[in-house]
């Protein structure tokens, strides 16, 4: 099994090898069902934090079978898992489907062969392309996980990879900025000055561009930024990690749209109506968006109105009285 340069699974998941057993699986599911906060919402069991299908089938089977009683009782609707693009084939997918697996996320990470090679990923972009196609042909809901800012990545290569993924039509995407985690091979390159991670500002800009492209293609981006956990936070040596990373990206996109709308008014008095549910995203992290719009002179004759009747993600301009 390959160990990628960016990987330290214990730090990322907070789990050590061998801690997930059938008993742990069943106790975890039962505990979750007892404290469900959203009755009526579909419950799924997820095996994340590694390449599930890289395990021997006997190990996969015993963990999947631990979920069977909950599937039979219809208290759990489906199983989802994450894995590598080169750890799937048609016979395995048939067995997984028979065990209740419905959603599979692929750790694609990059669609640039030079980046994959430098990261010692052990497969190329064609393997990811083939895996996505195979999953969709077999009827699985197919997700793709991407890492930006990996060693050897350039902006042009990242953009080309995103467009290639759009053509594959995955059902959803998660985007994570690459961070330097203690205990990973990439940490050694960082200390030696061989690798420099993206700045937080650059990571936000790049992920905002990716989000726009995927959204325009009708492909949901369901997460941006790593999930905070104690083991991860204590292990990050460098890189664009922030607990509000996803909101910062959303704020950047909102700023871009607000700037476009207000510039279209050419200085005329107007009101910018923003959904009240987007108040914090519109204002931006530490009110950065509001400050930047004011610095650009776009708020000089503009009233910002947070409208509770507007749908989330909605902004529109209303011209002031006596204007146009």
Image: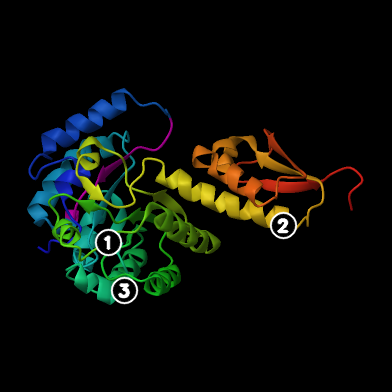
What's the CA distance linking mark 1 and mark 3?
A: 18 Å
Which image quadrant is residue 259 in? Answer: bottom right
Frontmost residue, 308 versus 169: 308
Q: Are marks 1 and 2 in contact (CB under 8 Å)?
A: no
Q: Is residue 36 left or right of residue 90?
A: right
Q: Which residue is mark 1?
A: 196
Q: Which residue is mark 2?
A: 263
Frontmost residue, 245 versus 266: 266
Looking at the image, tell me whether mark 1 or mark 3 is earlier in sequence order.
3
Q: Which percent across, then down, holds residue 118?
A: 20, 71
What's the CA distance linking mark 1 and mark 2?
A: 36 Å
Asked whether 42 falls inside the magenta stretch, the response is yes
Q: Which percent across, then down, holds residue 140?
A: 34, 58
Which numbered mark, 1 or 2, is in the foreground of this view? Answer: 1
Which image quadrant is residue 128 in? Answer: bottom left
Q: For numbered disc 1, what is the local secondary structure?
A: loop
Q: Which percent across, then down, holds residue 168?
A: 41, 70
Q: Is residue 172 left or right of residue 310?
A: left
What residue do we see at 23% from left, 67% from top? Answer: 90
Looking at the image, tell me whether mark 3 or mark 2 is earlier in sequence order.
3
What residue do we see at 92% from left, 46% from top? Answer: 322
Q: Is the magenta region chiefly helix, strand or loop?
A: loop
Q: Which percent across, then down, holds residue 16?
A: 10, 42
Can the viewer see residue 169 in this picture? yes
Q: Is 129 situated above or below 289?
A: below
Q: Which residue is mark 3?
A: 112
Which image quadrant is residue 43 in? Answer: top left
Residue interval drawn in magenta: 40-52
């Amino acid at each position: 099994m390959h160990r990628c340069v960016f990987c330290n699974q214990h730090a990322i998941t907070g789990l050590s090898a061998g801690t997930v057993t059938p008993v742990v699986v069943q106790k975890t599911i039962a505990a979750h069902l007892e404290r469900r906060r959203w009755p009526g919402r579909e419950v799924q069991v997820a095996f994340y934090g590694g390449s599930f299908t890289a395990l021997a089938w006997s190990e996969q089977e015993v963990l999947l079978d631990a979920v069977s009683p909950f599937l039979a009782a219809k208290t759990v609707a489906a199983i989802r898992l994450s894995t590598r693009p080169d750890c799937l084939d048609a016979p395995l997918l048939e067995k997984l489907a028979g065990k209740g697996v419905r959603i599979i996320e692929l750790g694609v990470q990059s669609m640039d062969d030079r980046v994959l090679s430098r990261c010692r990923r052990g497969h190329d972009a064609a393997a990811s392309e083939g895996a996505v196609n195979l999953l969709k042909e077999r009827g699985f809901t197919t997700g793709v996980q991407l890492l930006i800012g990996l060693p050897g990545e350039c902006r042009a290569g990242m953009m080309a990879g995103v467009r290639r993924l759009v053509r594959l039509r995955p059902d959803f995407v998660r985007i994570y900025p690459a961070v330097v985690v203690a205990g990973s091979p990439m940490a050694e390159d960082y200390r030696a000055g061989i690798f420099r991670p993206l700045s937080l500002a650059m990571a936000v800009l790049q992920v905002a561009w990716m989000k726009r492209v995927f959204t325009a293609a009708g492909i949901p981006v369901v997460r941006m930024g790593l999930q905070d956990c104690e083991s991860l936070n204590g292990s990050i040596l460098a890189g664009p990690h922030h607990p509000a990373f996803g909101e910062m990206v959303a704020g950047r996109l909102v700023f871009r749209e607000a700037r476009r709308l207000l510039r279209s008014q050419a200085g005329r008095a107007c009101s910018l109506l923003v959904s009240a549910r987007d108040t914090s995203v519109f204002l931006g992290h530490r009110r950065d968006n509001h400050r930047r719009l004011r610095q650009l002179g776009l708020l000089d004759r503009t009233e910002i109105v947070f409208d509770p009747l507007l749908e989330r993600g909605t902004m529109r301009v209303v011209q002031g009285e006596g204007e146009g």
